[in-house]
Amino acid sequence: MASKAIDGAKVLVEALRKQGVQFIFGVVGVPVFEVALAAQQAGIKFIGMRNEQAACYAAGAMGYLTKRPGVCLVVSGPGLIHALGGLANAQLNGWPLLLVGGSCDQGVEGLGAFQEFPQVQACRNYTKYACRPSSIGLIPMHVEKAVRTSLYGRPGATYLDLPGDMITGKVPAESVRDAPLCPDPPKVFADQRLVTEAVQLLKTAQKPLVIVGKGAAYGRAERSVRTFLEQTGLPFLPTPMGKGLLPDDHPQCIAPARSKALQDADVILLLGARLNWMLHFGQPPRFNPNVNIIQVELLQEELHSSVQSKVALAGDVDAVAQQLTMEHEKSPWRYPEDTPWWKMLKQKMSANAKAVQELSASNAIPMNYHVAYKQIVDLTPKDCIIVNEGANTMDIGRTMLPNYLPRHRLDAGTFGTMGVGVGFAIAAALWCQEHAPGKRVLCIQGDSAFGFSAMEMETVARYKLPIIVIVFNNDGIYNGFGKETWQSLLECGEHLGLVLPPNALQPGCRYDRMAGMYGGRGFNAETPAELREAVMEGLKSTDGPTIINVVIDGMAQRKPQDFEWLTKSKI
């Protein structure tokens, strides 16, 4: 009897299924169409996107939310190149991602084939592992290795390249080398001697601070970190995507006093946070020049980065937090609540809260960011997943939008990527369908950020995802210009490329009207009352998206800052 033949598409899909893949995001075409069809036949949900970049962003976010690699499928050449932004974003954020790219047939490689491109080579700068299997039979082995590499050590991105003739080619089923499910990464514990040293250093600190980062959220360290913090009474500061590991309203959270805490702390414990641009590299004047850093980091090459750590703990954040707690329990102590340090932090928090309240109470029309955010916060559920991106929209949203649960805030992240919003929101909404039915996804973006992936709203509608997209429309990047100024520029007689400000966008755009192209719900909000009504209507919708266009004063800014932003831009 002749042996049963199986094609490469089915071999690939079966290997992905055995690795626990439930979703594939992508854009189909030659030569990967067969892969998408085979995935659906195998029970893997294929989410067809409008652009490979957004598809890859969605896959990366799914990897973060599930702690298993998200999968993105793209066509050769330009399709692969479009996905590189999402690949780099996942790699820099430390999120597990597997990108699968079709490529030209092997028989015509080097001859100027359709969309021919050195794809494996191109992906190596953005991945932990990039490879083309040497045969159909070895595809499962390489899938398992790509999954394992994306998960083990610091998580990151991987790439598999499949030529068209490998996708459609057939081999005897018995020649395929099977690969088992890759187990979750082992927990890595730190040197116990150094754990003891770290706890002692915290105990003797006059101005201690714990910074809780995105790595702790990805590592599911919420229980262990909360136990350690509540036993020691130490003040903590979450990074933007570390928000929610403990609720923002926790009495030990000092986020409103961020600048003061960083500037004056004498001992800082980093839990899943890096001293990169987001934390000002740990350098003066944003940090105390004599600060002692205790660093908890899974990737040993990251230890002592930017500044020398006093204690460097190499290990998994969850495991090391448990070690810190157990060491503390040997000789319990608690940082007093009546210290000058706590008094200083609380005074700064109160002053900043007062400044925000004043901005939020403005009656001016158009609204400023703080007024708009207040209406949203008053109405949205505490358990909603928040996707937040833009310039001022994201910076102000970080302080105005409270988070109460871990992994419930997605933003531009370590790479500072703009345009991730709708892709992230799609992944979050699909995660909610599987794991938390009824939970809402709120995507708040600036008008510029929305423009990067606005056509993905059709994707949202096609899959009937009840995402509420709120566009903060200030007619520009950072700031915009009113219609009178715009009209005067149009009438000046010069070429518009010489007179229109580089950061200006067309004033008065009605992004809410995009909803009409797919029969969705759109609202334009120029006043707080209109915004509240629009949000309430959006929350009622359970079978499709809502777009709310919020008119923001083009000159509205953040509250005055103690320090310039790190780029020192002159605009």
Image: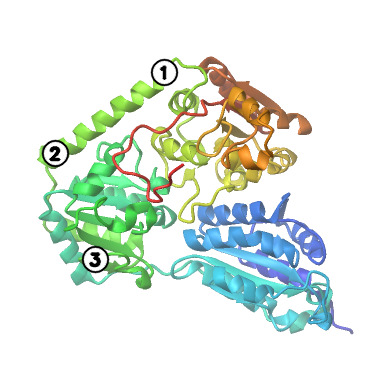
Image x and y of residue 93, in percent = 48, 58
Q: Residues within 10 Å of mark 3 (few under 14, many from 20)?
A: some
Q: Earlier in the sequence, mark 1 or mark 3?
A: 3
At which x and y percent is residue 41?
Answer: 78, 59
Residue at 60% across, 46% down = 434
Q: Residues within 10 Å of mark 2 (few under 14, many from 20)?
A: few
Using the rendered image of the protein, determine whether residue 436 is visible from the camera's viewpoint: yes
What residue would you read off at disc 2? 337
Nearer the viewer's eye, disc 2 or disc 1? 1
Q: Are marks 2 and 1 in contact (CB under 8 Å)?
A: no
**Amino acid at dot 3:** Ser
Spatial separation of the CA atoms under disc 1 and disc 3: 45 Å
The residue that label 1 is drawn on is 362
Residue 140: x percent and y percent? 67, 75
Pick the residue in front: 97 or 22.
97
Say which element carries label 2: loop
Q: Would you place residue 115 above or below residue 257 in this image? A: below
Viewed as shown, does residue 245 lie left or right of 534?
A: left
Distance between the alpha carbons at the discs numbered 3 and 2: 27 Å
